[in-house]
Image (cartoon, rainbow, N blue to C red):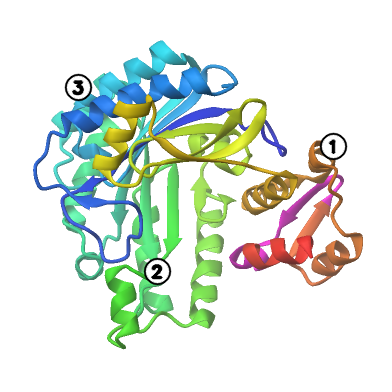
Amino acid sequence: MGLASPGGFGLYVHWPYCTRLCPYCDFNIYRDRQGGHDDLLAAILADIKGHKERLDVPGPLHSLSFGGGTPSLLRPAQIAAVIETADQVFGFVPEAEISLEANPDRLDMDRCAGFAGAGINRLSIGVQSLDDQELKFLGRDHDAEEARRALEAAAKTGMRVSADFIYDLPDQSVSSWSKGLDDALALGLQHYSFYALTIEPGTAFGLQVKKGRLRPAPEERSADLYILTQERTAKAGLPAYEVSNHASKPEEQARHNLIYWQSGDWIGVGPGAHGRASLKGQRHALEAALRPEAYTRAVQETGWGVVEATALDTQDIIMETLSMGLRLREGLDIMALQTKTGFTLPAEKLHELIEEGYLAKDGATIRVRTKGWALIDRLVLELLT
């Protein structure tokens, strides 16, 4: 359970295949050259059962999230099979969130209806931009009009709909993002995720930066764009409840992601999936075999896909709780942290960060102010040293 509020119990399903590999993505993904992948799907179903047999699971699922990769490449019948297996093995709480990440291309009314019929009740659509030139730069398969049609189709099914956007592109000005942000908010959605572009080593963009062909955005402008995003979304009735996530009301928040941020338990199935759950009474970090073939083989040979289970000590738990909990606007209950781990935040350092305007303290709760949201990793390290 979480320290700021109950974290709950979730299941993450990683589908690693994409029709193309985006130049900024450093997730565990592979180009889909054949389709189908029945062996992998069978392994995922078996892995769900294998986790139940080995772990001290806390109860029925509060959420199930399909991520990737591009899990919307799965057929509705395949998605239904995963949901049915999860229900048989763990069960679901009433009003559980069952979410699917989707790309706008090929996301028509029939496909959206198929997903809803399979049991999906929340669709997170990777729009990324409503500017065709930006979409081309980001290596996306869809254009702005296709994204709009996909959002309209999804909304007609009754599913909750969220859209992801990427900003802080290398040549993006404050004025161009201001227009892009206005266009995004004009869609009238109840949930948005706005992510600043991060160029990671090993990606196509990372290679271009290394060769001097691409220059990352300057930090000063990045900060300006972030503040603009916070101000504009709040004015539109979509305040940030987490560093990059905005919702019109609590019921629209991404419940599965809240499990991560509130230190709940979750299991991860699929190639390279991660989890956090109790094994023999101790919280563990769980990691599945990375490549699809290795993952499938691991499940077939051992009964589950986990190839690394690392026991988390008190210091690990403190670090994760601070790193994740401080991402939330509501902040972190430091008395609950102390009760659970015996750790007390250093009063002098805490006072210093409050005086500098990075943190705020309300009773037993500390939270990061807007000024500090881009610096959370640094703030956590300062609180721990």
Q: Mark 2 and mark 3 in contact (Cβ < 8 Å)?
A: no
Cα distance between the residues tagged 3 and 2: 35 Å
Read off the residue under disc 1. 339
Task: Examine the image and state in which quarter residue 170 appears.
Answer: bottom left
Question: Residue visible at 19% across and 29% down?
Answer: 39
Report whether residue 115 is seen. Answer: yes
Say which of 240 and 200 sits in front: 200
Disc on the earlier residue, 3 or 2: 3
- Which amino acid type is marked by label 3? Ala
* First to last magenta residue range: 362-375
Residue underneath mark 3: 77
Can you tell which of label 3 and label 1 is closer to the viewer?
A: 1
**Mark 2 vs mark 1, CA separation in Å:** 37 Å
Q: Residue at x 26, y 39 (%)?
A: 71
Q: Identify which residue, 130 or 305, lies in the foreground.
A: 305
**Residue in the image at 63% along x and 67% along y:** 375
| SS at mark 1 in the image | helix
Mark linked to residue 200: 2
Which residue is more in the foreground, 302 or 4? 302
* Quadrant including the N terminus: top right
Q: Is residue 92 left or right of residue 162?
A: right
C-alpha span from label 3 to label 1: 46 Å
Dot 1 amino acid type: Thr
Tell which circle, 3 or 1, labels the residue nearer the N-terminal end: 3
